Image (spheres, rainbow, N blue to C red):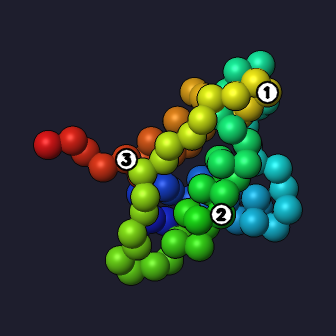
Amino acid sequence: MISQRLGPERVARLRAFESGSPPPFRIKMRGYDRLQVENYLRGIAELVGAENPVLEPAAFDIVIRGYDIKQVDAFLAPLRLPRN
């Protein structure tokens, strides 16, 4: 389950985001496209609690005034599938 892989702190941040709080990422001069990241987070939030979720790999454009790449990558790291 996604909630187990994310852990309680990240799940709480997703729920706060769903409730209208801003995502927990700094805005940098060059970063991930904010709308793409926010849409991806909404998709993850919908899958929390699902038994067999199908999660598409994250792929974000790098833009001017986007979310901090390192912070987003660290937040999503538990969801990455191990490479064979």
- The CA span between labels 2 and 1 is 20 Å
Disc 1 marks which amino acid?
Arg
Which residue is the site of mark 3? Answer: 80
- The CA span between labels 3 and 2 is 17 Å
Examine the rendering and report whether any part of residue 4 can be seen.
no
Residue visible at 30% across and 49% down in the picture: 81
- The CA span between labels 1 and 3 is 25 Å
Q: Secondary structure at mark 1?
A: strand
Counting other residues with Cα less than 10 Å from the Cα at mark 3, is it few (<14), some (14-19), or many (20 or more)? few
Disc 2 marks which amino acid?
Arg
Counting other residues with Cα less than 10 Å from the Cα at mark 1, is it few (<14), some (14-19), or many (20 or more)? some
Query: Earlier along the polypeptide chain: callout 1 or callout 3?
Result: 1
Q: Dividing the image into 4 quarters, which one contains the N terminus?
A: bottom left
Residue 4 in picture, x, y percent from top left: 43, 63
Residue 79 in picture, x, y percent from top left: 42, 51
The one nearer the camera, 10 or 30, is: 30
Which residue is the site of mark 2? Answer: 42
Q: Quadrant of residue 42?
A: bottom right
Q: Is residue 54 above or below residue 57?
A: below
Examine the rendering and report whether any part of residue 21 can be seen.
yes
Q: Secondary structure at mark 2?
A: helix
Label placed on residue 48: none
Q: Secondary structure at mark 3?
A: loop
Q: Is residue 7 left or right of residue 36?
A: left
Which residue is the site of mark 1? Answer: 65
Residue visible at 66% across and 57% down in the picture: 39
Q: Is residue 64 above or below residue 45?
A: above
